[in-house]
Image (cartoon, helix red, strand yellow):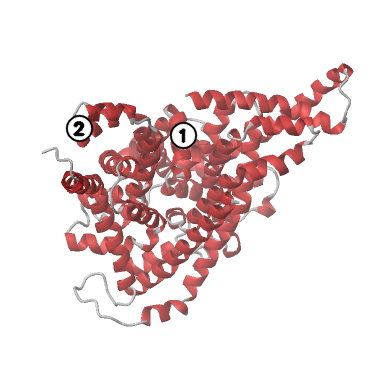
């Protein structure tokens, strides 16, 4: 909260500087008050240009989504004709057809289940490991940190084949458990580094007080450290939640049964197995993004912060 | 018990030290288990598998020496796919990050609507690769897609294309989708970086009479260097690993004109059932990515020390 306020203030300042800065460059040394009136229009013109540019970029970002929304409400003939951007008669039935034919209920429930369990698993594992790296002194700590960094660098394309082979050996292909285990594993390195830097930035006073009271380390961790770590946990949950929800490659490799597939895999299965009409497919796509988009719009401030934290660490 | 001699006093401390080491590893144990079993073991197996032959079913995986690597070295599709992702990386690097930096600078200068633009610019970034692929395969559709209709409306029928089916247009089309999908991410990081630059630097520059460009060149750009390094690395890695979007948009076609390494590896294993050659490709490709990351990290470490 505090950082956002400060950022907003900074932003106001820099916007105010923009005008005088340019003026100083053009009329060096002249600071007479008579310069004041002509400055106004130029600043306004700058503004208009700036907002124009930003508006264009905003249209670039949003147009494909609006077009998808529009197409999902048209009849096939209207869509193929391509005359209207606003549907002449919204075909809400497309959504019913998409929901039923696409088995979207099953896929969405699966996605919620996988995302929820994966995020819980990642939070548990990475907060323990992050705390150890930040606060405990023990042999092999440096080695483990290096291993985590190295593992983060190994890309999914280098591993997904052997992860699949390993799951075959464990009898965990086409299995919910196998998929969640892979999701948790891929989230751990980044989450651990974020939690580590979060714990490092926390004051030690409270846990020292608890230690003096005679509480065990694990007890301190659960009842003192974790409740204080909520902002860090929230950032990790947001990044990993999106990652798990949007995961596709392993879902493609692992699942054969439609009843087990998460939404991303379900959508491509719908395309290849049913070859739905275009407007139905667009409706299915809209339904599939409703959860993430709603969540994003509600929590966008935390998400922006989380994305930053994930990238810097 | 509270002896004054040093050896006796040390003994309990040594026991304490052992417990301290154990405690550390106890906290790490779950992470070690996950990373060990599902990352390090498969990583080793990938390398092993690249020297073997396996059809994905049989229990037998005979060693074939360097055969897989020899095959990959002469496998045109693989090198085409490497070239294609290099194109995506260049497009994301120059165009995507250029747009991201320009828009971050613009948003940083406005007073109203900052949250709105930030929300809108990052919106594509929360979508999945599959969703992005589905949206744009409709949008690019030569018959019903909005792109060709829009060109017709403004009388530019001559610019109409079979966006994803024409070999010469498909690659730029997919690159454009990648830029659309990915630039908001760089934008967020650039914006955060801009807001961290101390205001005093600009005030001092104003006193010296510096113009807008001079301020960008001598304050903003050097101050943003660490963020630029991170954004560049992440853009490169994202472009090189692109998979789902391409699979949905073109499945690598027409021909192999939009083939990407991950998709080729996937097909080699799960369609052609040649896991050995697929593993050899993933070792070469994964190795390239690792080396790129290391170079980039080394450069940015040296720069931050300088």
> What residue lies at 63% left-to-right and 42% top-to-bottom?
B223
Q: What is the quadrant of residue A45 in the picture? A: top right
Determine whether, in the image, residue B226 is placed left or right of residue B291: right
Residue A62 in view, yes or no: no
Residue B100 in view, yes or no: yes
Q: Chain of mark 1?
A: A
Between A110 and A221, the residue placed more toward the observer is: A221
Q: What is the quadrant of residue A36 in the picture? A: top right
Residue B128 image position (x, y, % from top left): 42, 45
Which mark, residue B209? none
Q: Chain of mark 2?
A: A
Residue B153 image position (x, y, % from top left): 66, 42
Which mark, residue A219? 2
How many discs appear? 2
Q: What is the quadrant of residue B27 in the picture? A: top left
Q: Which residue is mark 1?
A: A305
SS for dot 1? helix
Determine whether, in the image, residue A287 is placed left or right of residue A19: left
Q: Quadrant for the N terminus of chain B, please.
A: top left
Task: Tell which circle, 1 or 2, labels the residue nearer the N-terminal end.
Answer: 2
């Amino acid at each position: 909260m505090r950082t956002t306020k400060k950022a907003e203030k900074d932003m106001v300042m820099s916007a105010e500087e923009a005008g005088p800065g340019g003026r100083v460059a053009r009329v060096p040394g002249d600071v007479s008050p008579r310069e004041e009136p002509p400055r106004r229009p130029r600043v306004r013109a700058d503004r208009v240009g700036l907002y124009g540019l930003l508006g264009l970029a905003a249209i670039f970002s949003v147009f494909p989504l609006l077009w998808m929304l529009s197409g999902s409400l048209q009849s096939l003939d209207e869509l193929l004709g391509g005359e209207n951007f606003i549907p002449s008669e919204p075909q809400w039935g497309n959504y019913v057809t998409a929901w039923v034919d696409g088995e979207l209920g099953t896929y969405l429930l699966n996605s919620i289940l996988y995302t929820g369990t994966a995020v819980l698993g990642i939070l548990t594992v990475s907060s323990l490991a992050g705390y150890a790296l930040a606060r405990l002194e023990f042999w092999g700590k440096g080695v483990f940190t290096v291993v985590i960094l190295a593992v983060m660098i190994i890309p999914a394309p280098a591993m997904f084949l052997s992860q699949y082979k390993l799951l075959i050996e464990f009898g965990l292909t086409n299995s919910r458990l196998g998929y969640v285990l892979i999701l948790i594993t891929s989230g751990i390195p980044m989450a651990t580094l974020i939690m580590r830097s979060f714990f490092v930035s926390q004051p030690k006073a409270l846990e020292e007080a608890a230690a003096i009271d005679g509480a065990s380390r694990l007890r301190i961790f659960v009842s003192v450290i974790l409740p204080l770590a909520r902002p860090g946990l929230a950032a990790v949950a947001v990044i990993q939640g999106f990652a798990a929800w949007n995961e596709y490659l392993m879902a493609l490799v692992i699942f054969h049964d439609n009843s087990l597939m998460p939404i991303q895999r379900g959508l491509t299965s719908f395309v290849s197995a049913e070859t739905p009409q275009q407007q139905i497919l667009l409706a299915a796509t809209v339904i599939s993004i409703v959860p993430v988009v709603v969540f994003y719009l509600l929590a966008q401030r935390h998400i922006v912060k989380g994305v930053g934290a994930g990238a810097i660490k | 018990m509270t002896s004054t001699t040093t050896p006796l006093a040390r003994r309990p401390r040594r026991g304490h030290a052992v417990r301290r080491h154990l405690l550390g590893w106890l906290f790490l144990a779950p992470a070690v288990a996950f990373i060990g079993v599902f990352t390090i073991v498969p990583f080793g197996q990938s390398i092993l598998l690249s020297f073997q032959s396996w059809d994905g079913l049989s229990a037998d995986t005979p060693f074939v020496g360097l055969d897989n690597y020899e095959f990959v070295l002469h496998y045109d599709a693989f090198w085409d796919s490497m070239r294609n992702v290099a194109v995506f990386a260049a497009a994301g690097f120059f165009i995507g990050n250029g747009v991201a930096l320009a828009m971050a600078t613009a948003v940083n200068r406005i007073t109203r609507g900052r949250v709105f633009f930030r929300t809108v610019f990052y919106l594509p970034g929360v979508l999945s690769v599959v969703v992005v692929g589905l949206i744009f395969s409709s949008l690019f559709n030569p018959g019903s897609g909005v792109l060709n209709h829009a060109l017709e409306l403004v009388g530019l029928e001559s610019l109409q294309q079979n966006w994803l089916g024409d070999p010469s247009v498909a690659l730029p089309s997919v690159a454009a989708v990648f830029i659309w999908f990915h630039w908001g991410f760089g934008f967020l990081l650039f914006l955060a970086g801009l807001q961290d630059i101390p205001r005093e630097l600009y005030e001092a520059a104003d006193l010296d009479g510096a113009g807008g460009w001079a301020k960008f060149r001598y304050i903003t750009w050097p101050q943003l260097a660490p963020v630029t390094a991170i954004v560049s690395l992440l853009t490169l890695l994202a472009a090189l690993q692109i998979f789902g979007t391409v699979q949905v948009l073109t499945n690598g076609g027409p021909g192999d004109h939009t083939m990407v390494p991950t998709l080729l590896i996937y097909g080699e294993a799960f369609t052609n059932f040649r896991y050995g050659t697929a593993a050899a490709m993933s070792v070469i490709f994964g190795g390239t990515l690792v080396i790129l990351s290391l170079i980039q990290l080394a450069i940015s470490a040296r720069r931050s020390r300088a």
